[in-house]
Amino acid sequence: MKITVTTFTVHKKFPLQISRGTTSENTNLWLKIAAEGIEGWGEASPFSVVKNQRISTEQMLQEITSAILHLQAFHPLQRQEIAVKVNQLSLSSGAKAAIDMALHDWLGKKAGLPLWQLWGLDLKKIQPISVTVGINTPEAAIKRVRDWQDTIAVKILKLKLGNPLGIAADKAMVEAVKSVAPDIRLMVDANGGWSLQDAIAMSKWLSNQGVEYIEQPLPVGQETKLATLSNNSPLPIFVDESCFTSADIPKLAHSIAGVNLKIMKTGGLTEAMKAIHVAKACGLKVMFGCYSDSSLANTAMAHLSPLADYLDLDSHLNLLDDPFKGAIVEDGRLLPNNNPGLGVSA
């Protein structure tokens, strides 16, 4: 198989601020796997889970470029052998995701079927996506909510909290959002921006605001405190940065209510599917999230969406220059199309 990789840069309509910093643009990778006249596509986007530690575009590009020499002798149908080789090469999860995504796209195109149909999934099970409001002043948060309402039929808002100015600033933003969207469901993601004491206090306050759950309230490395938080929180606690793959889930399951799975963390659709089943076997809820991903990666996860309880696949909707077209938004839901493979075009 022939493997090629190129970079592309996307720019955000609204810069996104979370507890660890702000992003306004991203350079991602577009990977192509070709064989038998069929081309499968995958994406890798950079991300971080702790401040100052980032899986960069440059790192992933170097990894994939080196891996091509080891992978090009395989056929796309040799998935098990390819997986063994990829693991031997110790690629980052983002690089793995691009390869695995492209192999799935190739397989669907070979079969002439969209992935959701190959897996036998029911699109009617897909939940509405949440759309994200980054850390902002109350006035800017209101503006962001109104722009989202002008963009799609908003069913759920995901509010980024963990403001460096403290929980008083977080509360002011929540109150501002509720003033203009009183009937929209609310979720909160602190991106590890709270102490245990603040997380307990905020969980009680947010419960009274009608918030449904809190995602990643504590920083990575403080997982032993999650049980204490859950025991003192009236709201379900989900983790994101603390959970990459299926192997992370059992050791967290006793102290949380759910996990946020992202294709760049799991390393592809293959591991994402495994993580979904492990989470459900542990009695946990499952949500899908994203980084600064384009329609390519978000469409890939949309094919698995019938298996998720919550969906936060909105990053491509905040891009000024998304180079791809794939899943479509219909009544607040992100739905994969009926085209073969991922169903993504450029």
Image: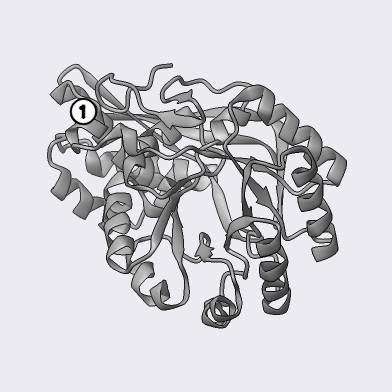
Q: Is residue 244 left or right of residue 134?
A: left
Q: Is residue 55 visible?
A: no
Q: Is residue 274 left or right of residue 256?
A: left
Q: Please say if 77 is above or below 97.
A: above
Q: Which residue is mark 1?
A: 108
Total numbered circles: 1
Report x, y in % for residue 311: 47, 44
Q: Secondary structure at mark 1?
A: helix
Q: Is residue 7 visible?
A: yes
In terms of depth relative to the viewer, which is nearer, 60 or 226?
A: 226
Q: Quadrant of the C terminus?
A: top left
Q: Label 1: few (<14), some or many (≥20) within 10 Å?
A: many
Q: Residue at x 53, y 61 (%)?
A: 241
Q: Please say if 319 is above or below 63.
A: above
Color style of the picture: one colour
Q: Please say if 7 is above or below 179.
A: above
Q: Is residue 42 left or right of residue 46?
A: left
Q: Residue at x 38, y 76 (%)?
A: 251
Q: Please say if 327 is above or below 216.
A: above
Report x, y in % for residue 243: 45, 64
Q: Residue at x 60, y 74 (%)?
A: 233
Report x, y in % for residue 186: 63, 49
User: Residue 179 appears in which quarter of the rendering?
Assistant: top right
Q: Residue at x 39, y 28 (%)?
A: 335
Q: Quadrant of the N terminus?
A: top left
Name the amino acid type tagged 1.
Gly
Report x, y in % for residue 30: 43, 30
